[in-house]
Image: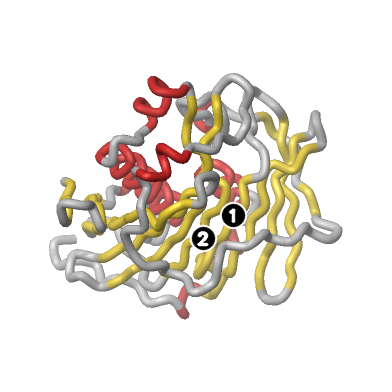
Amino acid sequence: MKNIQGNLQRAYSVDYNILSYHCDSFTDLRVSALCTFMQESAWLHSDHMGIGWKILMNESNCFWALTRLKIRILKIPRWGDTITVTTWSRGTDSIQFFRDWRIFDAKGVLCAVGSSVWIIMDTEHRQVQRNSSLALRFPLQGEQVFLEKLRKIPSLHAPVFSHPAPIRYSELDMNMHMNNVSYLIRFLDSETFLFRNENRIREAELNFLHEATGEVPISVGKADRDGARYYTLVSELQKTELCRGKIIWEPRDEIPRSPMSSSR
């Protein structure tokens, strides 16, 4: 169910029911699933603003591409909960387009916040496009959830790499490249069963550097520094770095959980 607030769209909200396949073995909402909800709400808002995927493709043979993403978890939603994902545009410099989110539980308690940077790329040459006309349709409509700008994640020093694995069918999106959330899932899947059982994500940040397409084998590298774990995703054929990530993990008991509803 969508709930549109205000004539000029200061915020666009979508309700999502958390189903069993959105959750981990603790019945907590997976952060990757939350990122999918956030991405979908961004598409819906863009459509409503007249600058969605179909419109860009029809008007200029271009598509939206995510370059930076940051999410901070304040409270973990759980199986059976309903959350509201609220998003808004934060203006543009005609090349980069800024978008933020807030995620609330059914009682209006803030569960997470997120911020992102997007660009427009043409489908033929895969080059960044400046679009001053589109910028007029992407106004500053809300405040910034993080005080700091989303900055470049530093390169990893001597990362330990996993065995390469090809891009899978389930990881490709409608633009025929690896979906944004799939990069994060690769990072999370590189962790051991024991580590994931003992820790959960407090904060995750990603820099998308190059698109990954086809069945190219890719490897995940990781290294710890300054209380965070850093990740890199590398194409084994071109030796190109595709994505960098930074995740702050914390013991599960230190992040508040949403109570299970009485109906479960």
Q: Please rate how many residues cluster around mark 2, counting C-alpha atoms within 10 Å: few if below 14, some from 14 to 19, many from 20.
A: many
Extreme-bottom residue of the structure: 254
Picture layout, residue 34 above or below residue 148: above
Q: Nearer the viewer, residue 13 or 118?
A: 118
| Mark 1 lies on residue | 206
Seen from this angle, which residue lies furthest right? 158
User: Please, what secondary structure does the residue beneath circle 2 have?
Assistant: strand
Left or right: 41 in relation to 90 = left
> Residue 61 placed where, x, y %?
47, 22
Residue in the foreground of this view, choosing between 75 and 180: 180
What amino acid type should be assigned to the residue bearing mark 2? Answer: Lys
Identify residue for label 2.
70
Q: Residue 259 placed where, x, y %?
A: 26, 72
Dot 2 or dot 1: first in sequence order is 2
Q: Give the class, few, some or many, for how many residues have Cα within 10 Å of label 1's Cα (few <14, many ≥20).
A: many
> Number of callouts in the render?
2
Amino acid type at mark 1: Leu
Label 2 close to label 1 by CB (< 8 Å):
yes
Question: What residue is rendered at 42% in x and 44% in y?
Answer: 135
Q: Position of residue 238 (x, y in %)?
A: 80, 31
Can residue 125 be seen? yes
Residue, x 74% and y 71% (percent of image)?
225
